[in-house]
Amino acid sequence: MSTPVLALTGVHRTYPGTPPVEALRPSDLTVRPGDHLAITGPSGSGKSTLLNIIGLLDRMTGGEYLLNGRSVGLMTELGRTSWRSRQIGFVFQSFHLLNYRTALENVELSMLYGTVGRRERAARAREALSRVGLDHRIDSFPGTLSGGERQRVAIARALAARPSVLLCDEPTGSLDSRTTGVVLDLLEELNQDGLTLLVVTHERDVAARARRRITISDGQLHETEMDSGVAAGAGSLAASGTDVRVQGESTGEGTPA
Ligand SMILES: Nc1ncnc2c1ncn2[C@@H]1O[C@H](COP(=O)(O)OP(=O)(O)O)[C@@H](O)[C@H]1O
Ligand SMILES: [Mg+2]
């Protein structure tokens, strides 16, 4: 079997404070190439914490995390930055585009920290924008684009670096329902072409598109079993310590979104 894209074993994250916040309890998660996962849970349950650890934006407190077979726990900050730029694509609710750069420039800029030469960057940026259906908008500034178009630029930006996994944090959270459908169709198509996709969402119709569904509450992961035919071979999840979870031991209550 191929090397998992993500393999987390007993990964946890505690934020210091009085009392400390156990934002992610020891968790195991295996994600294989081509998987499509949705992660849902109430506000403050640990979704962003998990995504930030997976995306190498934050460090775990303990456990082991292999990203494409490489252990990231002991990497230096520089090593993590470079590994992240090559392996991880991010899509955020609020797009995070630079307003005074064209769509093409926004996509090209994502490759500045990599090893991709100037011409290759331009070619890949055009290709990625074409992939998301925006050939005709490459010279447009974000302010002149609709929300759905902006999110497609952001998806193109993430794709141009050819990541092994795309992490989406509420990717349709700022979009109306019609545009949401367009963006979800695109993500689904990319997944069918082999892209590994991990989507954090609180929207049911977004989660319904995924082949694996993970819920998280109080920092504890649970995988909802889908009908066996679909779930077979699609990787596995086991939440370490499921049995010792203490009801009412809330860490996230009263936390605003
Ligand atoms: N930097 C931080 N310092 C302290 N506590 C934090 C920090 N970030 C998140 N938390 C806490 O960790 C818990 C999980 O937060 P988060 O992962 O952002 O949840 P979600 O994304 O599901 O809303 C919450 O209780 C939150 O208040
Ligand atoms: Mg969050």
Image (spheres, rainbow, N blue to C red):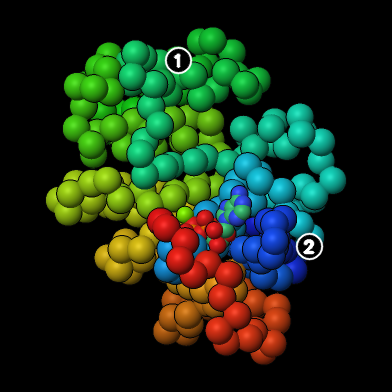
The quadrant of the picture occupied by the C terminus is bottom left
Give the residue number, with chain letter if any, for mark 2. Answer: 63
Kind of residue indicated by mark 1: Ala
Is residue 203 in sight in this rendering? yes
Is residue 229 in sight in this rendering? no
Instruction: Tell whether 8 sits left or right of 186.
Output: right
Residue 1 % position (x, y): 68, 64
Residue 25 % position (x, y): 67, 70
In which quadrant of the rendered view does residue 235 lie?
bottom right
Give the residue number, with chain letter if any, for mark 1. Answer: 122
Label 1–label 2 contact, CB within 8 A: no
Residue 256 % position (x, y): 42, 58
The answer for how far apart the CA atoms under marks 1 and 2 are is 39 Å
* Upstream in sequence: badge 1 or badge 2: 2
Give the residue at x 21% y 27%.
145
Instruction: Tell whether 238 sits left or right of 96.
Output: right
Kind of residue indicated by mark 2: Gly
Task: Work out whether residue 150 or residue 132 is closer to the camera in this orientation and state it.
Answer: 150
Disc 1, SS: helix
Within 10 Å of disc 2 (Cα), the crowding (few <14, some 14-19, many 20+) is some
Give the residue at x 79% y 60%.
62
Checking the image for residue 54, the label placed there is none
Residue 29 % position (x, y): 64, 67
Numbered disc in front, either 1 or 2: 2
Disc 2, SS: strand
Instruction: Tell whether 256 sits left or right of 65.
Output: left
Q: Is residue 50 above or below residue 22?
A: above
Q: Is residue 33 above or below residue 105?
A: below
Within 10 Å of disc 1 (Cα), the crowding (few <14, some 14-19, many 20+) is some
